[in-house]
Image (cartoon, rainbow, N blue to C red):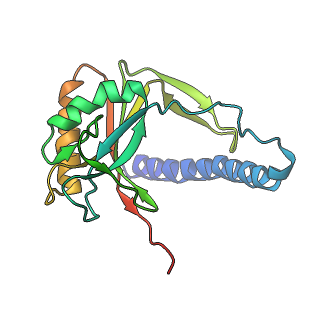
Amino acid sequence: MQQSLWVITMGNRYSDIKRAARLQTGLNNYINHLQTLGTRPSRIGTQGARNLDVTLYFQPFTASVATDEYVAGRCTTASDTKLRAIVNGADDAAVTNTLGANTLINLPKFRGARVVYFENATRSVNVETSDVTGLQYLKYAGERFSIPFGAQTATADQQDAFLSAKAAILAANASAAVKRVSLSREFIGVEPA
């Protein structure tokens, strides 16, 4: 019994050494990638423009604005169709596609809160090889949606609104095998004096 425990313990130690050797290869590839950065052609402009063709309006969580003042954010048509009604049904969260009689304001260096949702109908994964490290990793082949949102009331809390929206999104998409919902927090930069 004592000897088999020793073999298992030593086996774990050796697996760490093997793993470290593999990661060292990845680190060397990463360093080489950084050193040859200037010799590779740029990929800028090769993917085309993002299809952010829906403008949405909402009130910020962390900036004090009048009740009729809204900021704008953008998303894709697919994200708008998939998420806007669900987010609007959540407590403390609100987003609309019409400004109506409200006033659109510009907050310098402002980025609205955003719900990011990833889903895959099945648990199928693809084995990919990193261009940077040369190491293999598993990648879910699914769809990603994201939508900006704001406060439903002046006292709404961003985290509470997100958790409510997250629960509603997961409930509305119960049939998907893989579901991840995350929050990109609202950001307001500081203007130099």
Tell whether 68 sits left or right of 28. Answer: left
Q: Residue drawn 23% across and 43% down? A: 101
* 13 lies above or below 176: below
Measured as percent of width and height from the top left, residue 175 is found at 24, 19
Q: Residue drawn 18% across and 57% down? A: 157
Is residue 121 visible from the viewing direction of this image? yes
Q: As rendered, which of 142 and 71 lies closer to the eye?
A: 71
Tell whether 73 sits left or right of 43. Answer: left
Quadrant position of residue 91: top left
Quadrant position of residue 164: top left
* 146 lies above or below 22: above
The extreme bottom residue here reads 193
Is residue 148 visible from the viewing direction of this image? no
* 182 lies above or below 193: above
Q: As rendered, which of 174 and 80 lies closer to the eye?
A: 80
Q: How many marks?
A: 0
Q: As rendered, which of 36 and 91 lies closer to the eye?
A: 91
Q: Residue drawn 23% across and 55% down? A: 158
The extreme right residue here reads 39
Quadrant position of residue 106: bottom left
Measured as percent of width and height from the top left, residue 160 is found at 17, 52
Q: Residue drawn 15% across and 48% down? A: 92
Tell whether 111 sits left or right of 60. Answer: right
Q: As rendered, which of 3 and 100 lies closer to the eye?
A: 100
